[in-house]
Image (spheres, rainbow, N blue to C red):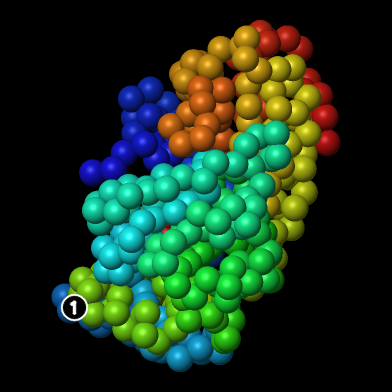
Amino acid sequence: MFTGHGGTGAAEARALGRPVLDVSASIAPFSPPEAARLAYQRAAADLDRYPPIDGFPLRQSLADSQGLDIDNVLAGGGTTEFIYLIPRTLRPGRVLGFVPTYRDYAEAARLAGCAFVPLLTVWEQRFARDLAKLDAAARAQDLVFLCNPNNPTGDILAPDVIRGFCDRRPDVTVVVDEAYVEFAGIDRSCLDSTMPRNLLVLRSPTKFYAVPGIRLGYCLGRRDLIAALLDAKEPWTVSAPALAVGLALLNYSDYEARVRDVLGREKPALECMLAAIPGLSVCPGAANFLLCRIQADAPPAADLRAACLKQGLLIRDASNFEGLDSRYFRVAVRTGEENIRMARIIRDVLTGPRDSKIACSI
Ligand SMILES: Cc1ncc(COP(=O)(O)O)c(C=O)c1O
């Protein structure tokens, strides 16, 4: 099993014997919408039956909501299922990705027997991804993963730029992972009814709707690529509760406005509090998390993580992302009070405790 992800707060809290503020997984800081909870409970009535083998009618509803056809949509057990299914099925020459990025792309390439080619982005340019570099590096029959916005840097590419690459390079398959796109604004999605032939888009309710436990994700693209994936896909990977929750979440706009409103205020405030801590720099990004860099003479991220955990805060030591090192960690944006607590603990660990006021607590 592939390890090294964030989101281990429950296990850490059990070991510690008290609650932990888990900012290591970048999940929206709210309970899932009430409609999702009710749908989950109602699905208990279906426990004695198999769900539809392919996620129908969720595939149809999602297709309708996007102006697509059911043949353009797959539903599965999280985008994770598709990250692994796509290279395994398409058997590309190589898999390319700008690093640092989500680590499962390289792992999926390894399991599919493909080389992973990392294209390095750097802190000094705030990890901006230059697709000219990709043009130069990609060969015919390669597959590219573009995480948009990118985890862990928050860098975002405009949909036009990605589509331009797809048009220039029809010999390359492009997978755009939009696990965090709702946080950046849905207009930043590559998804529409005129998708290039070589583009696959991954979407997930996990982060924005705070439903990591349900395991649901989607893969959208042109008919022939989707047909090849459907042919290779395991049956019944969308459970009855996941199906019910997915249907309930489509068109759930009240919650969306609330998340965007709160994070629109809280993210700049958290960024400001963290950037005011001596020895810490923050990479601004388009998603609901912030990548931070500790200055060279301060304790490394692993030590910071251990010390924060003793204070009831779990951060993501980001040193295991290819292209980063022991100075990097990532935190999710939470509610105002939680963000102040988070910034205070990080500050006290890095600089020693002082009066409880934190600079820039706007
Ligand atoms: C960029 C990215 N893609 C995909 C996933 C997996 O999400 P899902 O719950 O949809 O499988 C994650 C989870 O952390 C992620 O960060």
Number of numbered callouts drawn: 1
Q: Considering only vertical position in the picture, is 50 above or below 37?
A: below
| Occupied quadrant, residue 226 | bottom left
Q: Is mark 1 on a helix, strand or loop?
A: loop
Q: In which quarter of the image is residue 9?
A: top left
Whole-percent x, y for residue 157 in the image? 65, 59
- Quadrant where the C terminus is found in the figure: top right
Work out whether residue 314 can be spotted: no
Going by the picture, which residue comes out furthest to the left? 48
- Residue 2 seen in the figure: yes
Left or right of 330 in this view: 73: left
Measured along the vertical axis of the image, is residue 352 above or below residue 18? above
The image quadrant of residue 65 is bottom right
Task: Read off the residue under disc 1.
Answer: 50
Amino acid type assigned to the residue bearing label 1 in the image: Tyr
Q: Which of 315 and 175 is in front in this view?
A: 175
Q: Is 184 drawn above or below residue 347 in the view shown? A: below
Q: How far from the left and from the top, in percent, is residue 58?
A: 40, 81
For disc 1, the neighbor class at 10 Å (few under 14, some 14 to 19, many from 20) is few
